[in-house]
Amino acid sequence: MLSQQQPRRGMVSSLLAVVLLVASCLAAVARAHAGPHALTNDSVSLLSKGNWFVKFHSPSCGHCKRLEPIWPQLVAPAAAHSVNIASIDCSAHSLACEKYGIRGYPTMKFFMNGEEVDTYQGQRTVEAFSEYVASLSAPLISMLPTTGDEIKKTLQSDTSKPVSFIRWVPDESVPFGAVPFVAASKKLVFRSRFFDATGPESLAHLLDLAKVSGQRPPPADGAALLFMWRDGKLSLFPQDLTSLEQDSAVLDFIIRHRYPPLINLDARSGADLVGDSDVPLLIAFTSPTYPFHYSLLDGLRQVARASEAAGVPLHFTWMSSDTWSPYASRNFKLPIRPVPAEELRPGSGSSPTYPSVVFINPPEQTFTALPLLDLLAEQGPLNQVVDPEHAARIVAAVSASLTQFVADTQAEKLPAAWIGGWVVAIPRLIAKRFEFAFNWAVAHPILVASMFIGVIMSFVYCIIKIAPSDDYDSYNEAPRVLQPGGRPTGRVAAAPAAPAASASSKKSAKQD
Ligand SMILES: *[C@@H]1O[C@H](CO)[C@@H](O)[C@H](O)[C@H]1NC(C)=O
């Protein structure tokens, strides 16, 4: 009996498995065909669970229409990474859009369990969107390998995320510093990598890599440490995480160090640094096709490190002139197409050309450009492979010239121009000033209220003083005495009640 039943049971279970597989496959297909979730005022609460990529749009916006055929195509690839695709029509469901502070359409945001982690900045193609969604499917924090070589190899492996943060705990049961660490890993999901490490073996390797083994006593029992891999070096956060009273210190430290000293600016980091920041920015426009490109970046990096060490608030960045020349042309009057490497010629006159460095002052919306071609030509031929000696000369010349340039621009010694020209700059400047005035008013309500009352009162005072013109002689500037119910007769000076009247007014009174 038993021997007969077993194969049957096997058959039943495999049949069940096939049915389940088909069902789940059909469900996936159905889900893919169902298209994006159309969220409403009420169903927007669905965002509180799971991963969501949401498009906020309005039927009247042109860019939204172009996105319409693309958005449904993301449902299937996103489902493979357990990400829901949704859209919200803000013209009908304004409540839902207000909740997330949507200002313009279309806006695409990524949510993880109800928390907004990112606003999409990239290209609006199926490929770019899919890649974006896939990059989020990886775990936010991964485990660091334990041997020294593997640690270094892992930290160096992803050039698109050059900065990594490592939280080390003596054993996995220690929760110290986990809250800000997880919060930072969500905030910087597209910029930095986050690792967990544990145990004495990985600590020994980490301290060794950070070169602190000799100088630092072993951490106290139960201490949790934060390491940072940045600019090719491992360093240790100055404090033990367990001794910190506030998690915000860890978060601040991580956010402040999210970029390497020299940043390769793209759409994402550009929006982060140019859009919201009041910190001046230096952008080098150069092309990886130029023979001197890497030496130029080395020179730039040297100045960036020195500036960081001196605590100067300034971001050092570079952009590929191959890709970003339309942007450079629109905003900084650099040529539309970058100069091809074989056509590089010095002595191009006063017009700036590639490679160029632009210093940007975001609060003022101004920039100053420094063409570098002539400077580089002085160090050797521009079109030839750079040998080590030539490279050293370039690095020295670039860093000397840039140090001077940065000092001069910071001291406002160089003339600055408006970004995008005055047509763009003036309305922006007015808007900025207006915003400033408004913010100031909001910050000082009592002062504004008293100023307002003061203005009203002086206005009322003026009205009272000026309005009853009947009792005022505008020719002789001396008020008359009013008779009740009658016309004015005589002058104050002539009245006996004014003994202090001057001789001249007495005289004029006599003439009357
Ligand atoms: C969503 O909420 C807004 C604001 O309360 C309201 O004006 C709008 O009519 C609501 N939409 C729907 C479809 O109920």
Image (tube, helix red, strand yellow):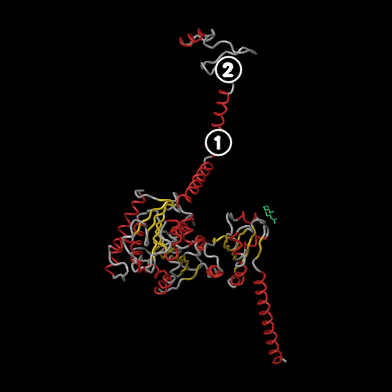
Q: Residue furthest left?
A: 389
Which label belongs to residue 14? none
Q: Is residue 86 left or right of residue 243?
A: right
Distance between the alpha carbons at the discs numbered 1 and 2: 34 Å
Q: Nearer the viewer, residue 45 or 265?
A: 265
| Residue 263, x across and y down, in percent | 41, 62
Q: Does mark 2 have its CB less than 8 Å from ligand 1? A: no
Which residue reaches farthest right? 1
Callout 2: helix, strand or loop?
A: helix
Left or right: residue 395 compared with residue 153: left
Q: Residue at x 48, y 11 (%)?
A: 505
Instruction: Place residue 8 in its image quadrant.
Output: bottom right
Q: Quadrant of ligand 1?
A: bottom right
Choose the circle earlier in sequence order: 1 or 2.
Answer: 1
- How many C-alpha atoms fall within 10 Å of the one at disc 1: few (<14), some, or many (≥20)? few
Quarter assignment of residue 349: bottom left
Q: Secondary structure at mark 1?
A: helix
Q: Residue sitting at 48 percent across and 71 percent down?
A: 143
Horizontal and vertical percent for residue 148?
A: 39, 73
Depicted 67 relative to depicted 413: above or below: below
Q: Residue at x 50, y 65 (%)?
A: 190
From the image, tell me which residue sits under label 2: 471
Q: Which residue is mark 1?
A: 449
Instruction: Check the picture and name the quadrant holding the N terminus.
Output: bottom right
Residue 212 appears at what percent x and percent y? Answer: 36, 65
Q: Amino acid at mark 2?
A: Asp
Where is 430 relative to 2, above or below? above
x and y, in percent, of residue 75 in the image? 62, 70
| Disc nearest the viewer among 1 and 2 | 2
* Of the pair 336 and 183, the residue shown nearer to us: 336
The quarter of the picture where residue 454 lies is top right
Residue 176 visible (yes or no): no
